[in-house]
Amino acid sequence: MMPFSRKMVTFVGLEKTNNLLRYVGQGNQLQQHVSNRAYDMDIIQFKNELNFEFTDDNDLMQKLRKFYTADGYTPEISIDGDIIHIKIDEKAFRTVQRDFEKAMDLCNRHEFDKGEKLLKDIITRCPLHVDAHRVYAQLAMERGDLDLAFDRNIEALRIDPTNLFALLLMGNICTRQNNSDLAEQYYDKVIEYHPDDVMAQNNLAANYLKRQDFDKAIEMFKKILEKNDDYLNTYYGLGMAYYYKKQLKEAFDITVQGMRKGVDRPQDRQIRDEIQKLAMQVARELTKDKDYSIEIGQQLKKLETMGTKPIRVDYNAKNLPVSARLEYSAAHHRDYEKVLVNPDKKYHDHLMMHELTHLELYLMAKAEGRNQLAMSGATEADAFRKWIAADLHNLRKQLSNEGVEKIVSQLHNGLMVQALNSPLDLYVEQMIFDNYPEMRPLQMLSLVDLHLENIQSVTRAASTAIPSKVLSANRTMNVVSALQLHEMYGFNLAPHFKATRKEMELAEDLYEEWKAYFFDTETKPGDEYELLEYFTQHLGVDEFFSMVNEMHFNDISLPEKSDLPAESTDPEVNREQNESFQETHKDGADPVETMMMSMYMLGALKELKPMPQSNVHRIALEIAMVGMTGINPKNKGYKINALPGREFGGYEFLAYYYVSWAISIPEKVNDLGLPFSNAYQAALDMYNAQNENGK
C-alpha cells in the first residue's frame, strides 16, 4: 500500500517494501496570489493585456479557467466584451484546501471509503483539481482497479500534462498493467519535463527499482549523485538496488557514503533510519562466515618485522572474559608476544585487530625511544580522592568505609584506563579503517555495538551515586569516540550520551585535536603521548597518574610468582626476611618493583622536599628506628609520628625511609642497604620534570 502524501516524495520502509514512493500535490500561481488574503477578490482584466493567444471567447474561457485554477479551485470567470471579471471566493478556496487535507489524512489512516467519498465530493465541486483526480487514481490502483486508476489519472494529466507525480503514477499504473512500453513513455516524460528536478528523477529511479530493473535504477541513481551528492534518498535507493543484485560490497560502500555525506531534510525523517538499517543488514551479510585470516596475517607479519620477538595467537581462549587481549612479552617473562582470542565472543576478529594495532603503536614508539608508561601511586590516589570528595558522602550512605575505599579504587583505576585509551583508541580504529578496508563492515558492526552498550552503561550510571566528575569525564570520552564513529560510518550516536553543552564542546575540541595530530604528515611515532597529555589536562584528570618514558625501566616484567617475604608480626622474623629480601632483590633487577618504588618515592619527594630540613631529618631517624627491627614490604600499618593520621604499607614505608635519608643524610643513604637507587633516580627525574613544567 502506497502512503498518501500531500507534500513529499521519499522512500519508505526497508522491511516490507516495494512501496518506495509517496506522491505529492502542488499549487500554482493562483494560490500564491490569494493565500495570504483574508477576503474575496474581484479581478478585472482586459483582453488586450493577456499574454497568451486564443481563438474565441470559449477558447479564452478554457485557458483562463486553467490559468486561474489552484489546488482544484476554479474562480468564477465571466467575459463581457473586452473586459474579463474573475471573482475569487476565499472561503470556498480555503474549504477545498481543508477538505483535500482531510482526505489525505483519511487515506493515510486506511479509512479509504471515507477518503474516497470526500475526494469524489471535491472533484464534483472542483473538476479541475489535479491532485484530487491523481489521489483518487492512486487509491483505485491500490485497490486493484487499474482501469479506473488509469481513467482518473488521465483526467489529471489532461488538466496538467506536465504534472510530475501524475506522470510517475501513470508509469506505475502501466507497469501494473504489464504495459512496460507505455510506462517507459511516461517515465521519459518525467525526464523531459523535469530534467533538473532531483526529486523527480529520484522517484523515477525508484520506480525502475520497484520494477526490478536494477541496472536501469543503478544507472539513474548514479547520474543523480553526479548532479547532487547530498540527497540521502538517492544513496538509499542505490544501496537497495545493489542489495537486490547481491552486490553487497557496493551496497555497503554506497550506504556508508550516504550516511556520511547525505543531508537530513525535514521531509526525510524516516530515511536516515532506513539507510542505517540497510547498512547494518548488508554488513551482517558481508561478515557472516567471513574469514579475516588474510588481513590478520598481514598485520601479524608486519608486526614481526617491526619487533624482535615473534607473536603467538591463542584462537581458543574461551575462558577469556573479553573478545581479545594482548599480553606483552616482557610483562609475562616470555620471549614472544601473545594474543588471546575468545571465538565465542562477538566481533572477536575486529577486536583482535584492535589489540594488534595497539601493539603496532607500541612498537613504533619504542623504536624511537618514545614509549610512555602510566603509573599511579599513593599521591595520585589521594589526588583522585580529593577530586571526588564532595560526592563521597553519597557513597558512604550506601556502603561501609571498606566498600567506599574499594569503589574509589575501582573508579580511579577505571578512569585512568579510559583516559589512557581514549586518544590511543582513536589512532587504532582509524588505522584499521585506513589499512584494512575489507574489515570495515565488521568494524562498523563492532563499534556500533560497543557504543550502544556504552550508552546503556552511561545512562544507568547517571542514576547511581557515582561521583558527578567521574561521570562527566566518562561521558565526554564516550562522545569523543562517538564523533569518530559518526565521521567514519555516519552513525550519529553522540547525542544519545546526553552530554551537557560544555561536555560536548570539550569532546569536539578533543576530537579536532586528535585529527590535527593523526592527519599531520609530520607526525612522529610517540606523538600520541603528547596528545594523551592534552586529553588528560583538558579533562582535568592528569593529576591521577604520571607518564614516564619506558627507557627508565627497560622492558616491563611482572613476576609470575611473588617472591616477597610473607607477612609477619615477629621482629626477628621480619629482620631475617628483610635481609633475605635485600639479598634476592638486586637494585633495579625487577623493573616492575622499580617502577612501583619510584612512584612511592615520587609521592615522598612531593611531601618531604618542601619541609624544613630538620623535620625531614627527624622523620629519617624515626623510620631508621623501625628499620632496626626489620621492615617487611608485605606488612601494613606502619606509622610515622611526624606524619600523624596515616598508615603506610611496607613498600611505601621503605620509600619514605630511602627518600628521607636521601634528602637529610645523603652521604649515609647507601649504608641503608636498600636496593632502590635506580627507583630513587627515576623518581627524582620525574619530580624535577614536573616542577619544571609547573605541575
Image: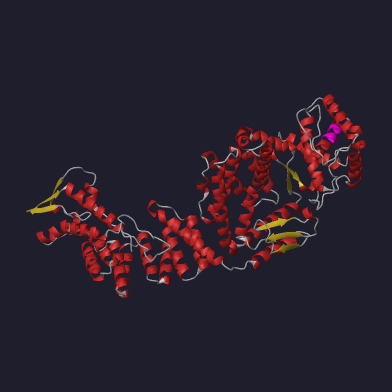
Tell me which colouring the rendered structure shows.
Answer: secondary structure
The quadrant where residue 614 appears: top right
Residue 660 shown left or right of residue 14 in the figure: right
Q: Is residue 245 magenta?
A: no
What's the residue at 60%, 44% (across, down)? 474
Image coordinates of residue 348 in percent, x first then y, are 63, 61
Is residue 229 something one can see in this rendering?
Answer: no
Residue at the left extreme, as displayed = 81
Residue found 46% across the figure and 71% down from its top: 245
The location of residue 61, given as percent across then percent down, is 13, 58
The x, y position of residue 578, in whole percent, is 89, 41
Q: Quadrant of the C terminus?
A: top right
Q: Which stretch is magenta? A: 656-662
Counting from the top left corner in percent of width and height, residue 411 is at 65, 42
Q: Main secondary structure of the magenta part?
A: helix
Residue 530 versus residue 116 in the image, above or below: above
